Amino acid sequence: MLTYRPGDSLAHRLDPRTKLLAQAAFAAAAFAHTTPRGLAAFTVVAATFLAAGRLSPVRALRGYLPALPFLLAGPLVSAIDIDVGYASAPALGVDPAAAVEPLLASYRVLLILFVSAVYLHTTPVRDSRAAIQRLVPGRVGRLLGVGVALVFRFLPLLRADLRRVREASTARMGSERPLRDRMRLLGSAGIRRAFGRADRLALALRARCFAWNPTLPALRFGRPDALGLVVAAALVGSIGL
């Protein structure tokens, strides 16, 4: 799973608020340009984002493996043409032209995921929380900041728990069981561990006098942020073109 890794790349030096704005601007511009030519241009932009964060596209794809089947399912389902006739049995055919638009949409989402991966790879969780609470004022911002921080910290632990459960089951010849039994064992063990971690997290938060307004890291814009803001402004300006 994609997590923060310290580094000295250009994206690492950017203020998290700049990266959030650039990410939102990229997503808005990508949805505004749906033609193959537009997506080809945004492929170059996404590659530039990856280079700025020194993140390999292969590693970004691995981080989003659970989402890839859904991105592929849309074009495949759209290409299947079922002709239901009254005089004969339904005929199953393939219409490649019907898969073009869903394929472009899935590719557009993939580019947005690449840009999001750069943010996750280059931004500490505490900085993300501080950026959200400064961009969204009041109690709503504090709630969003806490939620984002907990999700970023909790999901990698849950994935690690599921991986250990699966490895332990395989070591005990669990791979010889039927698929339904393997799914049941993995699901029940994952739920038990998730509830256990949630209970320990709640106890730790109470023991540490968890507050709504903790001391957050100081955020300040630097010279590299000027380039990031220019990129965000250019992406927003391209929407009307």
Image (tube, rainbow, N blue to C red):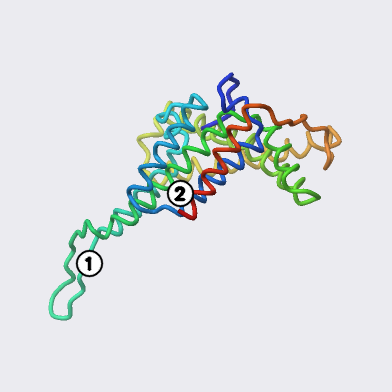
- Please name the residue that numbered disc 2 is placed on: 30
Residue 5, numbered circle: none
187 and 48: which is toward the camera:
48
Task: Left or right? Give the position of 63 relative to 8.
Answer: left
Q: Which tag is nearer the camera, tag 2 or tag 1? A: 2
Query: Which image quarter: residue 15?
Result: top right
Determine the secondary structure under disc 2: helix
Q: What is the total number of numbered labels drawn onto the structure image?
A: 2
Residue occupied by mark 1 = 82
Task: Indicate the position of residue 124 as horizontal and vertical percent values.
Answer: 65, 29
Q: Is residue 52 left or right of residue 224?
A: left
Within 10 Å of the Cα at label 2, are there few (<14), some (14-19), or many (20+) other Cα atoms? many
Circle 1 crowding by C-alpha within 10 Å: few under 14, some 14–19, many from 20: few
Tell me the distance, in whole angstroms, between the alpha carbons under discs 2 and 1.
32 Å
Task: Please provide percent x and percent y for residue 161.
Answer: 56, 32
Query: Callout 1, which amino acid?
Result: Ile
Q: Which residue sits at x=30%, y=59%?
A: 78
N-term-proximal mark, 2 vs 1? 2
